Structure formats: C-alpha cells, structure tokens
Image (spheres, rainbow, N blue to C red):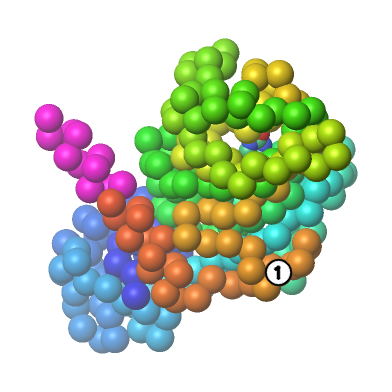
Amino acid sequence: MERLQKVMAHAGIASRRKCEEIILAGRVRVNGKTVKDLGAKVDKDDLIEVDGKPIIMERMVYVLLYKPAGYLSTVVDPRRRKTVQDLVGDIKERIYPVGRLDYDTSGLLLLTNDGELTYSLTHPSFQVEKTYLVEVKGKAGEALKRLEKGVELEDGKTAPARVRGVQEKGGNTVFQLTIHEGRNRQVRRMCEHIGYPVINLKRIAFAFLDLKGLRPGEYRFLSDEEVEKLKKLQGNYAGFLSKTKNI
Ligand code: URA
C-alpha cells in the first residue's frame, strides 16, 4: 500500500505537492469514489482516476543484487563498459541503484524505481549501517583501531566505525568494517589513509539485508516485509528531519 499522492506522482501525473492539490480539489476517484484525504493509501489493484481518466500504475520494484567486481553502478556507460543494468535487464521497470559501489567493489547493491526511498537511503544524514569485507595489503593489526576512532580525510573526519573479525591471510589482513556514512570511495580512502591499501572490497550487508542465497551476478526481489522494514528506517529519518526543522 502506498500513499495516493505518491502513486500519482510516480505515474507521472505531476509533482507530489501538485498531486496533493489535485486530491484536495476533489479531482481524484479511487474505485469510483472521490477521495480528498491525503492519508489515503492505494495498492496495485485499485482503479485511480484523475478528472475521470484512469492512471497507469507502475509497479514499485525493489531488487537486491550481488554485484560482481568489474561492473559499473550506473545505468549506461558512454565507454560501453558492463553496468549493473546488464544484470537486471530482464526486469522491465526502469530501476536505479541506491547509491553506488565502485567498479572494483563487489557485493550488495539495491536497485529500485522508488525515488523517494532512494533519496532518503542515500541522504548523508541518513545513517544506515553498511558492512564491508575488506582485504588490505600488509599486516594491519593495531592500525585498524584508528578506523574505529575516525580518520581525517580530505572531505572531513569520518564518523566512528566498527572493525570485527580481523584475520591474517598470507601477508595481508582481512576484516569486517561497518560504517554508516556513504562518501565516495570511503572505505578505500580510510584504509589508504592508515597506510594499508585495499586489495579486495565486498559489501556484505546493508542495514538488515545481506547476500545470503545469492551468487555474484544474481539478484532477488525484496519481500514485502523487507520493503516495509526499509520504509520504517526511512520513516525514522523523515521524523528526524521534521524534528530538526522545528528547532
Ligand atoms: N567504499 C569504497 O571505497 N568503495 C565502495 O565501493 C564502497 C565503499
């Protein structure tokens, strides 16, 4: 179930604000009944008419992709390199990545046509936890503690992070790093900063979602429960924003 004005905006009727005005003006019918309530929710089986004309609803699609290394997180590349679009090409809705992973990074990437959810999940003040499996060159040991405290990068100090499961592998170090910011190439820059360049990077978790059951290049649709849970996170964020606005 989605808010009526969101579904209308998504169908290309007008901006969400404008759609609210259209609803309040009594121009919208749902299953034959005029609806003037901005809290009204609809689902894909409802018939929505604006000024008597039915609107075509696009299905909201939420996809969890196991991105392999060697793919761009964009939809098209002028240099014709492979993109994540090539991996979800059989989905007919136009979906876009929620944030991005570097070309060389593998792991969990969400894609959706829900612009509102994308906006809040990628907003810098939205603190969703992302966990990476990181391999760095050399025996990093104690130096990893510096990542937990935050390191000074050219775009400012990073927020405290969490390091877990440190293991030596050959002469290298493997560990899990959890951050909740989403700056460009952040993990690579953090590790570079402490003197241990990244050799391998894979995102293994995004909020409560992980890669279970998927192999590189495969995707699955999120369940309704997972979508609702993500939206709840988003709801917390929206609440946070409106609170700070009132100050
Ligand atoms: N941090 C990086 O450095 N690269 C990614 O792709 C994701 C997080």
The quadrant the C terminus occupies is top left
Secondary structure mostly seen in the magenta stretch: helix
Q: Using residue 128 as the reference point, say whether residue 73 is left or right of it.
A: right
Q: Quadrant of residue 124?
A: top left
Residue neighbourhood size for the residue with mark 1, other residues' Cα within 10 Å, grouped as few (<14), some (14–19), many (≥20): some
* Residue at 79% across, 28% down: 138
Q: Is-magenta flag for residue 239?
A: yes
Q: Quadrant of residue 240?
A: top left
Q: Is the residue 108 above or below the residue 197 in the image?
A: below
Residue 149 x %, y %: 47, 25
Residue 3 x %, y %: 30, 67
Q: Is-magenta flag for residue 164?
A: no
Q: Nearer the viewer, residue 72 or 195?
A: 195
Q: Which residues are magenta?
A: 237-247
Disc tally is 1
* Residue at 19% across, 64% down: 38
Q: Nearer the viewer, residue 86 or 94?
A: 86
* Residue at 58% across, 62% down: 210
Mark 1 CB lies closer than 8 A to ligand 1: no
Q: Which residue is mark 1?
A: 214
* Residue at 54% across, 66% down: 62
On the question of residue 194 being in view, the answer is: yes
Residue 95 x %, y %: 61, 59
Secondary element at image label 1: loop
Residue 125 x %, y %: 37, 35
